[in-house]
Amino acid sequence: MVVTSSTNSTSHRISAVVPVYRAPKELNRLVNDLNDLRVDSETKYGNTFIVTEIVLVHDGGLEETRPLIRELARRFEQVRVIWLSRNFGQHPATLAGMSATSGEWIVTLDEDGQFPPNQIGDLLDHALSAKSPIVYGQPAVHSGHQLWRRIGSFAARKLFRMLVGSTGGVEFSSFRLIMGELGRSVSAYCGSETYLDVALTWVSSRASSIRLPYTSNSESSSYSINRLAAHFLRLVLTSGTRPMRIFAILGTLTASSGFVLAALLVYRRLVLGFPAGFTSTLSLLLILVGLVLFGLSILTEYVGLTVRAAIGKPLFLVISDPSKSPLYRDTDSSQL
């Protein structure tokens, strides 16, 4: 990628959004690398772009992250900070940052810098050549996470496609390039439990993904098993009602099998002259009751999601810098 010193009026203007929770040491390097793209940069295929703004979204993270973010905002003119009132999660924080952008394109990056900013040009090249308004960057090799997490991610992707249908071979990731209009529109109407990438499929019929070099940093992940499970559940629930339709089909097949088995048991009792086994009956009962309870739990999650959306639970809440809050008026701001 070639960097030029002047600004071309035909350059693609890109806004970078970085949700920040822990602000690891990689964040400083990431912002420095993004700042280097504040002038015209030429991609491998001759397209030019410029990163016009860097939006850091403080997702109610650790208090020690605040001084670093303020320092970055002082050092770099392109950096703007969005403060959230508490930890809402990565997707709401990303949406909060997207809503504050103005670029033709929006690129979202993790705070750990596992996908370096110099790969933004690769996303742009693919978006323009494939006429794709949404492009995801995927690791060219496995991510370096623990084996159990890689197996779980693989199983989750397969289950997701089975439950919600084909995604056209696109694999979601947090390194995305999105047309600015689409990103800001999605951030305007997303509900509190909406999965960002699913919401993007509602407004665009085309998305794609490409393989890119990846810097493994398994130590930086703050996702526990419970958070990953909740993340996957929200992904499935916001993808529509296909899971419930699958359970309806499964229930129909199970009921049909029950009628056939009942006929066989009656025949066995009347013709062969000995009673049906208690164990087989109990096993069948347990299977059916388990399916019913599992289906009801999924339905309950849908109802809960609807209720939370109906009562107006906010997706995120933007506030001013906590150092300006009346709670800390008499406190040294360097300690906040």
Image (cartoon, rainbow, N blue to C red):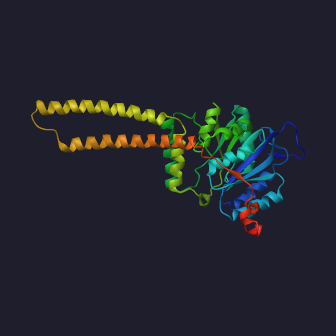
Residue 226, position in %: x, y? 50, 54
Q: In which quarter of the image is residue 284?
A: top left
Is residue 102 or residue 110 the one in the foreground? 102
- Please tell me which residue lies in front, 84 or 81: 84
Q: What residue appears at the point 65 percent right and 33 percent down from the top-left corner?
A: 203
Q: Quadrant of residue 293?
A: top left
On the question of residue 150 being in view, the answer is no
Q: In this view, does 66 lie to the left or right of 154?
A: right
Question: Residue furthest toward the right?
Answer: 6
- Give the quadrant of residue 61: bottom right
Q: Which of 70 and 35 is in front in this view?
A: 70
Residue 18 rendering spot, x and y as whole percentages = 70, 51
Residue furthest to the left: 273
Q: Which of 20 and 117 is in front in this view?
A: 20
- How far from the left and from the top, in percent, is residue 128? 74, 34
247 above or below 32?
above
